[in-house]
Amino acid sequence: MRDLVFPGGTAVLTGAASGIGAALAHGLARRGADLVLLDRDADGLAATVAAIRAAYPDRRVETHLVDLADADATDRVAAEIHRAHPRIRLLINNAGVALGGRFDQVTLEEFLWVIEINFRAVVRLTHALLPALKAEPGAHLVNVSSLFGLIAPAGQAAYAASKFAVRGFTEALRHELVDDGVGVTSVHPGGIRTRIAASARVGSGVALDEYEAGRKQFEKLLTIDPATAAEVILRGAQRRRGRVLIGWSAKLPDLLARIAPAGYGKVLALGMRQRPAGPAETPAAAPAEAPVAASAAVPAETSATPAVEAPAVRADVPVPSARTGEEAVPESGRRA
């Protein structure tokens, strides 16, 4: 499959108001794509659009305010986009939320809220817009999963369930859409420096002091700039990578899960004792980042593994794997 061509194509992006989503919007505009941006944060979305129009006045930018937790609203917006854009070059399902707490610390309503946004909204938008992707030669689909779509630590039942679902859905589509000429990429971010911790949602059964105690420590683990993450994602899509891992904090746990698929939990628990972690979350219309392993922690793209010495690599240079074709970028200014 040839490289993805951005100029002149229409890119649909969820979670565009801040963090990785806003950085993706800027990266797409810089590459010459016209934009259809979705978010529930009106002010944040307006700020993203204003900045893009100021920098790239020739780009066409369309916006839709939608809460992806509302299935009917999501379906309506998807239908509107398809009517207006019968051919779409790129769809990036980036928005997501997280919920901190063990399964017995969250309500069923809270659990299903995560599933609705992180997984079912991805399915709804992809199902509605897949005909438009098939109609556009050389189209591509990007679904943002998580580090916790690779490993599933204690305290992240809802988030990990949703992100493993995204991963499985994306991998199946990658195989199904080969003959249609549509590329598919699953993204698994590590410690991205976004609003994760500040906007966290905590399960009803989690003590707030327990949550707050870990939050400040957790924020120190978020080292990768969203712009760096966005560039890795867009380079991976352009090169038709099947899977993109961002940061050593995603790459190393992935390796650990491959080596010890049934025993990595013990290593994660050891890492948690050595390095305290706290919570984080991505708002419903904001980018999805991966979480840390702790019963009261809310997901954010970071690793709970103990320190492992890895080669020093420039933070802005992706590290492709000759064996898997995956791509990863290390955290800026640190060794994993």
Image: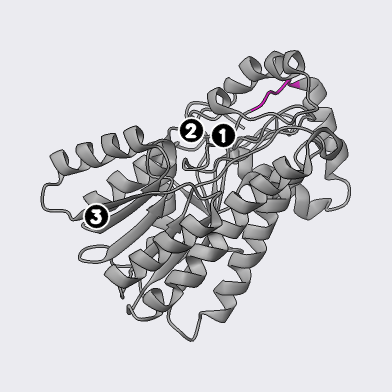
Q: Position of residue 59 (x, y in %)?
A: 16, 53
- Amino acid carrying mark 2 in the image: Ile
Residue at which label 1 appears? 191
Q: CA distance from mark 2 to mark 3?
A: 22 Å
The residue shown at (49%, 86%) is 179
Question: Along the line of sight, which residue is nearer the eye, 227 or 17?
Answer: 17
Q: Position of residue 206 (x, y in %)?
A: 78, 25
Question: Along the line of sight, which residue is nearer the eye, 7 or 107?
Answer: 107
Label 1 Cα crowd, 10 Å radius (few <14 / some 14-19 / many 20+): many
From where the camera sits, is residue 326 visible? no
In contact (CB < 8 Å): disc 1 and disc 3:
no
Residue at which label 3 appears? 31
Per the rendering, the mark at residue 224 is 2
Question: Along the line of sight, which residue is nearer the eye, 159 or 29?
Answer: 159
Q: Is most of the magenta stretch helix, strand or loop?
A: loop
Q: In what element is the residue under mark 2? A: loop
Q: How is the image coloured?
A: one colour
Q: In what element is the residue under mark 1? A: loop
The residue shown at (14%, 39%) is 54
Q: CA distance from mark 1 to mark 3?
A: 25 Å
